[in-house]
Amino acid sequence: MTTECKDCRGTGSITLSEKECPDCKGGGKQKSISLDKLSEKDISKLMAGGMKCARCNGTGKISVTEPCKTCGGRGKFFTCMICGNTITGKGDLCENCAKKPLIHILGAECDTRELEVGKTYEGKVQGHANFGVFVDLNPQLRGLIHASNINFSPEVGDKIFVEVKNIAPNGNIELLPRTLKEFQVIEIEKQLPRRKTTELSKYLGKLVHLSGEVIQIKQTGGPTIFTISDEDSTVQCAAFEKAGERAYPEIKSETMVKVIGEPSMRNGAMQVEIRSMKQLWGGDATGIKEQIERAIDKRAEPHDIQFLVKSEVMEQLKPSMRNAAKLIRKAVFKSRPIIIRHHADADGITSAIAIERALLPLIRSVGGSDADRYFYRRSPSKAPFYELEDVTKDLTFALEDQERFAQKMPLVVLMDNGATEEDMPSMKQAVIYGVELMVIDHHHPDGTIDSMVLEHVNPAYAGGDFGITTGMIGTEIARMINPDVTEEIKHLPAISAVGDRSEAPESELYRSLVSERYKFEDLKSIALALDYEAFWQRFSDGRGIMNDILNLGSNIRHSQIVKLLSDQANMAITEQLEASMPNVKTQKLPNGAILNVIDVENFAHKFTFPPPGKTSGEIHDRLCARYNGQPVVTIGYGPDFAVLRSRGVKMNIPQMVKELRSEIKGAGVSGGGHLVVGSIKFVEGMRKEVLAKLAEKIGAAGT
């Protein structure tokens, strides 16, 4: 290893003074010129005004120097190959290490080009013959100690020191045994230029040097497969000890390694057959890691897009959206698994699938055709927040993958949930295990979770409200991640707007964008089909069916499945409302609002579609039509919960939840949601008190 001398700046000499150039006498121009020896270029220079003096390069002065005393005139400091101390003299070893004989250990990738006659090497006895002893210097090189040169019989497998006596033209290596009591060990590696993963196709069947980060380790029934990532991409590297036995057990995930091996094509993909692999330490590891980080940071920059519609709120939110897109792209390039957790309704589903459609091609391009099986998962959440049940599943899967494949802990992207205090218990648990979190939501934030997440994209932080749906935001972020998916996902914001009953100006703009292909009733049917299918899918992502509902596959199948599911959903809603509507109790509050309450536990079908929240929403829609132009609030309640829907009443449900919690002791009130749409939980025995206080607060709200 070498470092440049700071005193002489690597020149090996110190300038003492300057004196007049003796050749040009300080003029800087050449005095005597032989024309017959000049080239055409030199003649042109001469005609243009003379030629510079060769000795002083036209300065008229020359420097008076002496050798640098600091580095001994070498310009650089050399460190000893054995102990790492600075060498003052010549050679590769310091004075102390040079006193002891050297034993060379050949790396597995070395061949005869790394062997030198007269040097001593460590070997392993491979076998005996009448004419001598065979010794392996590494897995590639085997030499022979002739019987006439050895007077003892070592055991097979014994380590032995041997001197290379001769290397024949046919590659045969003649060895001599050596016995040493004191010695220095030095490892010999094949010196190859570092290649990038994207360059490997040029070197098929040749030995290459690859340095990068181990991001995944899979043990197969045969070799161990290490996935290595560098600045450009990833590649699988195979090492074989014994069938099903872990090769290089000392190599762990997220370590920097140097691999020497042979690239080849296997099943249509690049694979490197490992000759040797070692972990990099110190400056070597840091240098490579910094190069990779810089390159990935540059590649992760999101695409600069124009939004599909004009929106002042989203323009204000654009820096936050760009950062979210960059963090997601960076996770892909660093091969960090990504989990998208989304609310299981039309808005949550459209937002998550928009990101999914942008991500999958990117993940496959980086990690191979099956990479999405290991580095991506989408999971719906029944509640509009990150429940403990959700984080438990995410951590269980992540820890299993870490154990089986040595993968990094994932980036969890919470969509259409994650913005409130209710998410904190799960987030705290995730952070303990090294999970990275991001929130993309339009529920009213309370600021409690922001310190826990890498980014929180929320229209409330840009002067907007829940009318800007997560589906709108998610689709635009998806286009920043991968603009190639724009055409296939540009109808998703319109579906989310209709499904979430958005009345924001952006809702009309997104619907107009796709109006030639999707009428309002079409969007309404798709949103209803999503809600209906999500209810039966439970905790499955239902990728295939959801893609068909969203017209991301066969257009014929899309039409058929949407009609079938929306018809079934409407039939179920009709049956539910026939049972529920006669049992709605209505009263007029002091502020003039019409309050409607329904006991969905006793006057609605349970464990079927529509669930209590959807049932309350459908009842609310019909009552809004009945009391057209008047402020209306609907509460659907059960033994320990209440679902609220409001039109024309200025409520703040998250704030009301906080007040109820402090005002009614022993009720265990929790919940939240949007300002005028949300849910509240409480203990069953305090239901009457909570509902009475809730009605009082609604009656005091502005209209």
Image (spheres, helix red, strand yellow):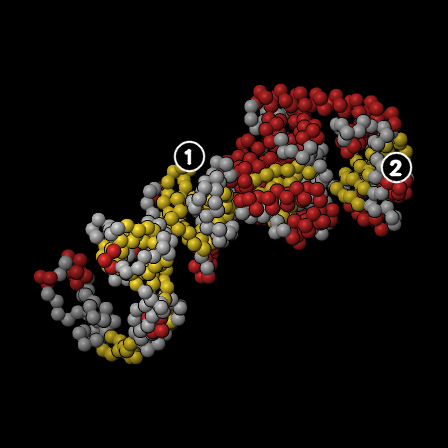
Please provide percent x and percent y for residue 388.
71, 44
- Give the image quarter of residue 614: top right
Neighbor class of circle 1 (other Cα within 10 Å; few <14, some 14-19, many 20+) is: few
How many C-alpha atoms fall within 10 Å of the one at disc 2: few (<14), some, or many (≥20)? some
Q: CA distance from mark 2 to mark 1?
A: 72 Å
According to the picture, the residue beneath numbered tag 2 turns out to be 592
User: What residue is pinned by disc 1?
Assistant: 267
Q: Percent position (x, y) of residue 675?
A: 76, 42
Label 2 with label 1: CB-CB less than 8 Å: no
Between residue 4 and residue 469, name the one nearer to us: 4
In front of the other: label 2 or label 1?
1
Q: Is residue 218 above or below residue 604?
A: below
As drawn, is 53 to the left or to the right of 659? left
Q: Residue at x 23, y 73 (%)?
A: 60
Q: Residue at x 25, y 56 (%)?
A: 147
Image: 329 above or below 523: below
- One can see residue 512 in this view: no
The image quadrant of residue 79 is bottom left
* Quarter that holds the N terminus: bottom left
Where in the figure is residue 491, as x and y percent of width and height? 60, 31
* Label 2 or label 1, whichever comes before in sequence order: 1
Identify residue type, mark 1: Asn
Return the residue nearer the eye: 312 or 67.
67
Q: Secondary structure at mark 1?
A: loop
Nearest the viewer among 308 and 418 is 418
Image-based side of 373 in relation to 81, left or right: right
When the figure is inspected, residue 51 is found, relative to residue 679, above or below; the finding is: below
